[in-house]
Amino acid sequence: MKISGFTIVRNAIKFNYPVLESIQSILPICDEFIVNVGDSEDETLALIQSIDDPKIKIIQNTWDMSQGKEVLSFQTNLALEECIGDWAFYLQTDEVIHENDLERIKKVMQRNLNKEVDALRFKWLHFFGSYFRYRIDRGWYQKQNRIVRNNGQVESCGDAYGFQRKDGAVLRWAHTSVFLYHYGWVHPQEVMAQRRKNANDIGFIELTEKDKEEKYQFGDLNRFPPYFGSHPKAMKKKVKSHILSCEDLKDVARRFWWHPARILKLRYKTYKRIKEKIV
């Protein structure tokens, strides 16, 4: 069984994407890793080239922003076309896998290798504002596919949040029962504001004038569930250096000193879904 990893990246330094951490988190189980590097305003290409591993294969493209949000799936599919493995493991540049889950993921791929399965699904932890708070309210999907069978029949779709079959049939998937750690909403407030403005300019979202403030406001983090478990080792430096998270961790320890999951440091997510969307 051969495993290809793949991703797309552009302006990783400018917008604080943890792309190195993302790639390195699954590189141990990959036979190759395809990185589609777009034309950037920073040193993103040099950053990817700094990964000293023969598994890394870089392709370069100019992104056509007139495609709107579809540019992401278009570029993702260009990277997927370069993959040669039986399975293709896709991570966006703010998504990371915990090292303790790698062998389990590999076993799930092996178990489904000869079955009629198009994709493998992950449970999501959408961290927000702090590395110790996550979203489970309406509008934040909790399950998504990130590993696809590399047979030419599956493609990225929309803004590259998921995959579909090219023939229009229903995508057949199996669970990995593994968490995917999504860090797209854990950034300094200034960086978060810049990222949202960039998304607005491309056409992914539509911001009001109030939304375009220089600092993004996360609000009261206590309205979100706390996370008591560990983070991937690749993210250790970023977690320790994030000021808001350090402050929030103290608050979590004070408020939930009694919680068994905190005492045991369980990698756990509540299944009590908040139905109302929290803005």
Image (spheres, rainbow, N blue to C red):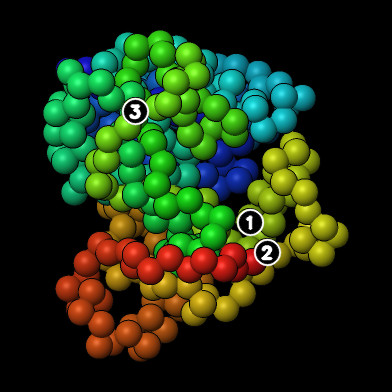
- The front one of 102 and 159 is 159
Q: Is residue 6 above or below residue 82?
A: below
**Alpha carbon of mark 3 to alpha carbon of mark 2: how far?**
39 Å
- Please name the residue that numbered disc 3 is placed on: 172
- Please name the residue that numbered disc 1 is placed on: 192
Q: Quadrant of the N terminus?
A: top left
Q: In screen coordinates, is 141 left or right of 189?
A: left
**Alpha carbon of mark 1 to alpha carbon of mark 2: how far?**
6 Å
Q: Is residue 169 above or below residue 136?
A: above
Q: Position of residue 224 (x, y in %)?
A: 48, 72
For marks 3 and 2 on the same chain, the one whose residue lies earlier in the sequence: 3
Q: Position of residue 83 (x, y in %)?
A: 37, 14
Q: Position of residue 117 (x, y in %)?
A: 28, 25
Could you tell me which residue is drawn at 34 percent across and 65 percent down?
A: 271
For residue 216, which numbered disc appears in the image?
Answer: 2
- Picture quadrant where residue 213 is located: bottom right
- The front one of 65 and 247 is 65
Task: Answer whether residue 58 is visible to the viewer in this image.
Answer: no
Q: Amino acid at mark 2?
A: Tyr
Q: Report if the CB atoms under discs 1 and 2 are less than 8 Å apart.
A: yes
Secondary element at tag 3: loop
- Picture quadrant where residue 237 is located: bottom left
**Alpha carbon of mark 3 to alpha carbon of mark 1: how far?**
35 Å
**For the view shown, which residue lies furthest in the right direction?**
209
Q: Amino acid at mark 3?
A: Arg
For mark 3, does the 10 Å Cα neighbourhood hold few (<14), some (14 to 19), or many (20 or more) residues?
A: few
Secondary element at tag 2: loop
